[in-house]
Image (cartoon, rainbow, N blue to C red):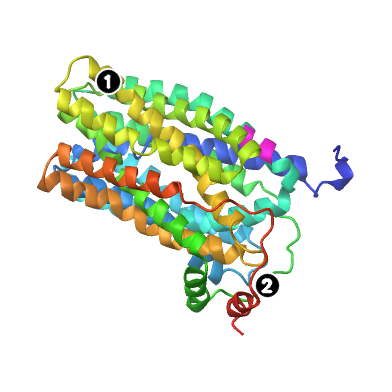
Amino acid sequence: MHTSQQDLPPHYRRNFAAFLVEYVFFDLSISFVGFTSVVPTFLRQLTDSAPLVGLATTLFHGGFQWPQALFAHLTRRHLRKKPIMMWGAIGRVFLWLVALALWAGLGRYPAAMLALFLLGISIFALTDSLVTVQWFEVMARAIPSHRRGRLFGLAQVISGVAGIGVGTLVGRILSASYRRPLTGYALLFTLSGAAMLVATVALALIKEPAPEEVDPEAHTRASWLSIVARDPAFRRFVLCRLLLSGVDLATPFYVVHAQDALRLPASRIGAFVIAQTLGAIAGSVLFGAASERWGSRAVTRAASLLAPAGPLLALVIHLSGGGWPVLLYPLIFAVLGVMYSAWILGFINYSQDIAPEGLRPAYVGLTNTIFGLTTLMPTLGGWLLQSFSYTVLFASAAALGALGTLTAVWLKPTPKKVHAEPELLRSQAGI
């Protein structure tokens, strides 16, 4: 159906462009210092501790996920969200601090550099968690629902294509600086900071539409517990996702394994970034079509089938001891890209689809809180690697992923419309 310009919110074109630029350049910034490719190898320059390498991923993802429900609760009475969003964006200076520290030679003191990085990544994750909560609320008011598909679709295509170039550049920078690797990482953090600066300027250019009246009632712990107690479909979904998160035991250690065990050169890291980017593009296209045709459960099931493939392939390559199977290593990162593309289209949408009307905010908040626990997996994976071997690490990740795949078979079909039980609605309202 055609929509006239009069039906669009004020400053629609400006906001569309600002959100698009912010999305793309934020994504590119993270690509320069990828947490599955660049950061693990950077940290290995500072420490031999596998748990500490995994801790960085845990701090980043945990700091980003865990506080979102709390931030949504604390800021619910503030009708203007952009000022909060801009205050949170101050934490993005972390990228520049790491770059400056490396250029200044702090890398000669590995313990100090590691401490600065871990502290900085924690602050960055926490502050950008605050930004994200406000970002989605402002975006919902600035971009009408029938125009969001083109915004995210265009942003993902641009980010994907540009990400291929970033991957090539990352490989060349690290290859050229193999004698002084920390110089290469300093340049990557500088480029990441520059891209993040563009994203933050775009964030500042967003014109926040007039605020809407919001329901000030907060969801209590009792209401969250009532969802778990009364909804078996949600319990099955949570169990499936928690088991699938077992594959993240190995995620930060693929690139470390490629360098330490397989002796692949640093230049291959760029190929891994490209493979993950191509996987994300392919996954977005395929899962987008699948979601339109068959719904979020189909996407969730398809992603679940792929989950064990990454650690299983890594295990096979590791046990082969080298040779031609090493050529398949980029496929591990391609699978990661496909899996990540299914997060919103599959898992997040499924949690909303099974939620009764009137309870979607509570379901989303509870989903994010529970799934925040999965960010502990990389640290646990580091302990497994330190205590045992790559064989145990990859086998454990593949086994948990396979159990998650089996659990996905019993996911409840998404109903067209579900009405909340009166008792559950009253519980949510605190009555």
Q: Is residue 175 left or right of residue 133?
A: left
* Depicted 206 relative to depicted 156: above or below: below
Q: Residue at coordinates 61% horizontally, 79% vertically from top-left? A: 423
Circle 2: residue type? Asp
Q: Is residue 301 visible in this depiction of the protein? A: yes
Q: Which mark is residue 175?
A: 1
Which of 344 and 305 lies nearest the eye of the viewer?
305
Mark 2 or mark 1: name the one nearer the start of the chain.
1
Residue 292: numbered disc: none
User: Going by the image, does 323 lie left or right of 401?
Assistant: left
Crowding at mark 1 (Cα within 10 Å: few <14, some 14-19, many 20+): some
Q: Residue at x 40, y 58 (%)?
A: 372
Residue 325 position in % (x across, y down)? 24, 19
Horizontal side of residue 236 vs 295, given as left or right: left
Vertical position of residue 213 compared to residue 240: above or below: below
Residue positioned 76% across, 60% down in the render: 210
Q: Main secondary structure of the magenta part?
A: helix
Which residue is under mark 2? 215
Q: Count the marks: how many? A: 2
Q: Secondary structure at mark 2?
A: loop
Residue 383 place in picture, x, y as percent: 17, 50
**Residue 66 image offset from top left, x and y in percent:** 42, 61
Label 2, residues with CA under 10 Å away: few <14, some 14-19, many ≥20: few
Q: For the N terminus, which image quadrant?
A: top right
**Helix, strand or loop for disc 1:** helix
Q: CA distance from mark 2 to mark 1?
A: 54 Å
Residue range in magenta is 149-153
* Residue 124 in view in this figure: no
